[in-house]
Amino acid sequence: MSKIRKAAKPTVELRPSRIRRDPVPVAEAAGEKKLRWESDERDIWIALIGIVAFALAIDIIIVAISTYWN
């Protein structure tokens, strides 16, 4: 049978991981203004404006190219 090997160096005490800590209670986070709720309606409007702006840019490019070739 083989002998149990002893470690040459002592083990290092690791600090606790931030991921495994308990989460901050909601009441405490709300008091510190860490929580912020953004409406889904606002996100929809921003996305819609972005799509319309992109479509307008593509349209302007197509009109400019067709005007240049004629």
Image (spheres, grey):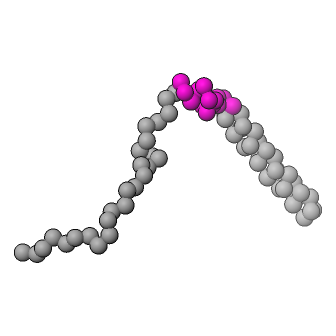
In the rendered structure, does residue 56 fall within the stretch colored magenta?
no
- Position of residue 34 in the picture relative to residue 5 (left or right): right
Q: Answer yes or no: is residue 40 visible.
A: no
Where does residue 39 sit, x and y in percent of width and height?
A: 64, 29
Q: In the displayed structure, would residue 54 be above or below residue 30?
A: below
Pick whichever, 19 or 13, lies toward us: 13
- Quadrant of the image containing the C terminus: bottom right
State left or right for residue 49 relative to residue 63: left
The quadrant in which residue 42 appears is top right
Give the x, y percent position of residue 20.
41, 44
Nearest to the observer: residue 22 or residue 9: 9
**Point 84% across, 56% down: residue:** 61
**Quick one: 40 or 22, which is closer to the camera?**
22
Residue found farthest to the bottom: 2
Q: Looking at the image, which residue is at 72% across and 37% down? A: 46
Residue at x-position 81% and y-position 50%: 57
Q: Quadrant of the N terminus?
A: bottom left
Q: Which residues are magenta?
A: 27-42
Q: Is residue 30 above or below residue 47?
A: above
Whether residue 36 can be seen here: yes
Tell me: 28 left or right of 12: right
Q: Position of residue 49 (x, y in %)?
A: 75, 39
Residue found at the very far left of the displayed protein: 1
Q: Is residue 50 above or below residue 68?
A: above
Q: Is residue 42 left or right of residue 57?
A: left
Residue 5 position in % (x across, y down):
19, 72
> Is 12 placed above or below 3 here?
above
